[in-house]
Amino acid sequence: MSQFFSDFSMHLPATAGLVFFVLTLPICVWVAWSDMKAMRIPNKSVMILAILFVGVAPFLMPLQTVGWQLLHLVIILLVGILFNAAGLVGAGDAKFAAAAAPYVVIGDLRFLIALFAACLLAGYTTHRLAKHTPLRKLAPEWESWSRKRDFPMGLPLAATLSLYLLLGAIFGA
């Protein structure tokens, strides 16, 4: 196991991962909480996430790289619009994914997909189990408890971004 960690590395620069992790963590908590409580991701949170990247990234990476990273936002937003129109994802989920996309280095995409799958499985399982335990009494007004078919995807999306940035801070280039 220790051999894995000694060989594991990410393409995200470690300094960028650390700074972005610290700055985006409150936004990610807000997104997850809001989606579980009201089944919606606030537009303000998405805008702040995108503006934060634009404002901070030029101090952490070359401008050319920042430009390429911003292209991720455009591509994921277009894909998200299509997926939303097809009824596959919610509009807030698509917008959050687009705003989070610039933070992800393309060389880490395979890792990110695996991390998202793990966060989705963990988030879904934990949320569905928690609603049948006394933990539900801590937030009885959450709309996500009563939705049978819907799931607050802001939870695994936000967790994925936060964990990706944290791991980038630890194992980044």
Image: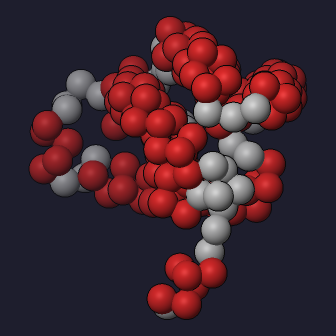
* Residue lying at 13% horizontally and 39% vertically, measured from the top left: 137
Judging depth in this view, the residue of 131 and 167 nearest the camera is: 167
Judging depth in this view, the residue of 38 and 14 nearest the camera is: 14
Q: Is residue 32 above or below residue 41?
A: below
* Residue lying at 27% horizontally and 52% vertically, measured from the top left: 130
* Residue lying at 20% horizontally and 42% vertically, measured from the top left: 136
Which quadrant would the C terminus be assigned to in this image? bottom right
Judging depth in this view, the residue of 66 and 38 nearest the camera is: 66
Quick check: 44 left or right of 11? Answer: left
Judging depth in this view, the residue of 66 and 150 nearest the camera is: 66
Q: Pinpoint residue 39: horizontal percent, then vertical percent.
A: 46, 25
Quick check: 169 left or right of 140? Answer: right
Q: Pinpoint residue 78: horizontal percent, then vertical percent.
A: 86, 23
Quick check: 64 left or right of 51? Answer: right
**Residue 43 in view here:** yes
* Residue lying at 76% horizontally and 32% vertically, measured from the top left: 62
Q: Pinpoint residue 49: horizontal percent, then vertical percent.
A: 55, 21
Task: Report which quarter residue 26 is drawn in.
Answer: top left
Q: Pinpoint residue 141: horizontal percent, then vertical percent.
A: 24, 25
Q: Is residue 149 above or below residue 141?
A: below
